[in-house]
Image (cartoon, rainbow, N blue to C red):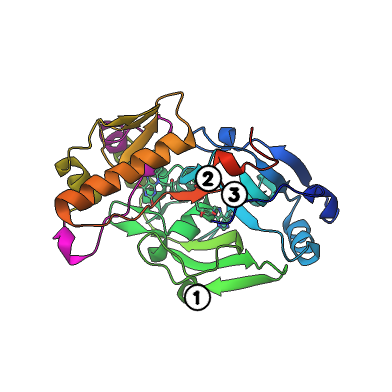
């Protein structure tokens, strides 16, 4: 990764005027589930879609863009994130039902989308109730659980390109596969059209309650964590074993580094016990990868998105 040069002038002064909010050195630790990491050089919260489009159309081309949703799958490094971090707010959180379709803004919580569908007697979206993210993050990650994923329910997604164009993408164009979309990382999802099918609200509610209790038993859902750290491997050396099985077999359950812990409850989860730095969490994850490779020959890939720069290259200089 390129070292961040000490800026000769402030980024915020080079950015176009907006109706929403531009905040310099905006803390990101409180916006991610891990509760670690340095600030955004500038954080942009657009007032609405037009504000986002005109900002992107007018911003200097060399300014890096990073999008964060609810921060449930992101590890922000201790030096923060250079460039502009975009976070969609309330203007993008609307949810509306139209027959068997649900139109949801990218900032809508997955849980609220599942609840709205359930209240409208739509089944097939229950799995979203167990995923603690937003629809934007769910599109990017093709979020899924209990045998279903966004790919199964998405009809269309709206996105704004880095040059400010609003485009409608079909399900095919999203190119969704296991925890992945082919859409470029600097495109910002703004909304999705999801489909369900008519069902009995009582049965749907019972399914959602079951999902909730299964999660509480099997995952440290209340902890400072980013969910599954590594994707389940597909290479032959894994012989069908899931990431957690390989981690367990490598003896990593309960392993600690600084304030970071490999969860005892679900060993594919990393936990910030309170005083962890992003560097602790990343180094612990890398140690898990090393041990898994040593014991099984499988190279685990991070599912968690790691963004930003280490403390030595901190945004605005070392702190
Ligand atoms: C306790 C726990 C349990 C979890 N269980 C599951 C599970 O069962 N299944 C599962 O799939 N995941 C799970 N996750 C991971 C996570 O919740 C999902 O990946 C979720 O979809 C991320 O959404 P987010 O809004 O938090 O995105 P973030 O974590 O903020 O971002 C994730 C990625 O999405 C991108 N992104 C976010 N919003 C947008 C947008 N509007 N436009 C473009 N890109 C965007 C970011 O740039 C980043 O690359 C779990 C996490 C936790 C903490």
Residue 80: name its quadrant. top right
Circle 1: is it few (<14), some (14-19), or many (20+) Cα within 10 Å?
few
Asked whether residue 99 is in view, the answer is: no
Specify the segment rendered in magenta: 213-240
Label ID, residue 107? 3
User: Image point 65% across, 49% down: which residue?
Assistant: 82
Assign the C terminus to one quadrant of the image.
top right
Label ID, residue 173? 1
Estimate the x, y position of residue 301 in percent, counting from the top left.
34, 56
The secondary element bearing badge 1 is classed as: helix
The residue at label 3 has a CB less than 8 Å from ligand 1? yes
If you read the primary sequence from the N terminus, does the residue marked by circle 2 or circle 1 appear first? 2
Q: Is residue 252 left or right of residue 11?
A: left
Calculate the distance from the C-alpha at mark 3 to the C-alpha at mark 1: 21 Å
User: Image point 73% across, 51% down: which residue?
Assistant: 46
Circle 2: is it few (<14), some (14-19), or many (20+) Cα within 10 Å?
many
- Which residue occupies the foreground of this view, 79 or 52? 79
Calculate the distance from the C-alpha at mark 3 to the C-alpha at mark 2: 6 Å
The secondary element bearing badge 2 is classed as: loop
Circle 3: is it few (<14), some (14-19), or many (20+) Cα within 10 Å?
many
User: Image point 80% across, 50% down: which residue?
Assistant: 8
Calculate the distance from the C-alpha at mark 2 to the C-alpha at mark 1: 23 Å
Circles 2, 1 touching at the beta carbon (< 8 Å) = no
Label ID, residue 109? 2
Q: Is residue 42 left or right of residue 28?
A: right
Tell which tag, 2 or 1, sits nearer the viewer.
1
């Amino acid at each position: 990764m390129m070292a961040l040069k000490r800026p000769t002038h402030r980024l915020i002064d080079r950015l176009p005027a907006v109706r929403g909010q531009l905040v310099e050195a905006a803390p990101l630790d409180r916006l991610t589930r891990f509760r670690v990491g340095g600030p955004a050089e500038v954080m942009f919260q657009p007032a609405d879609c037009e504000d986002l489009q005109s900002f992107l159309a007018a911003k200097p081309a060399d300014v890096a863009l990073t999008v964060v949703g609810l921060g449930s799958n992101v590890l922000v490094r201790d030096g923060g994130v250079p460039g502009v971090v975009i976070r969609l707010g309330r203007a993008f959180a609307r949810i509306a039902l139209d027959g068997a379709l649900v139109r949801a803004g990218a900032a809508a919580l997955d849980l609220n989308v599942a609840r709205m569908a359930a209240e409208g007697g739509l089944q097939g979206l229950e799995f979203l109730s167990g995923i603690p993210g937003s629809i934007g993050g769910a599109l990017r990650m093709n979020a899924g659980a209990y045998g279903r994923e966004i790919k199964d329910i998405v009809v269309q997604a709206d996105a704004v390109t880095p040059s400010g164009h609003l485009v409608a993408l079909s399900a095919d164009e999203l190119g969704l596969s296991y925890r992945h979309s082919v859409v470029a990382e600097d495109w910002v999802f703004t909304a999705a059209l999801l489909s369900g099918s008519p069902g009995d609200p009582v049965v749907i509610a019972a399914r959602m309650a079951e999902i909730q209790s299964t999660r509480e038993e099997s995952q440290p859902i209340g902890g400072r964590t980013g969910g599954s750290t590594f994707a389940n491997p597909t290479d032959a050396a894994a012989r069908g074993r899931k990431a957690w099985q390989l981690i367990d077999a490598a003896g990593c359950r309960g392993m600690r580094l600084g304030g970071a812990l490999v969860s005892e409850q679900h060993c594919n989860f990393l936990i910030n016990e309170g005083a962890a730095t992003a560097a602790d969490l990343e180094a612990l994850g890398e140690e898990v990868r090393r041990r898994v490779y040593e014991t099984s020959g499988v190279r685990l890939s991070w599912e968690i998105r790691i963004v930003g720069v280490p403390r030595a290259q901190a945004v605005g200089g070392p702190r």
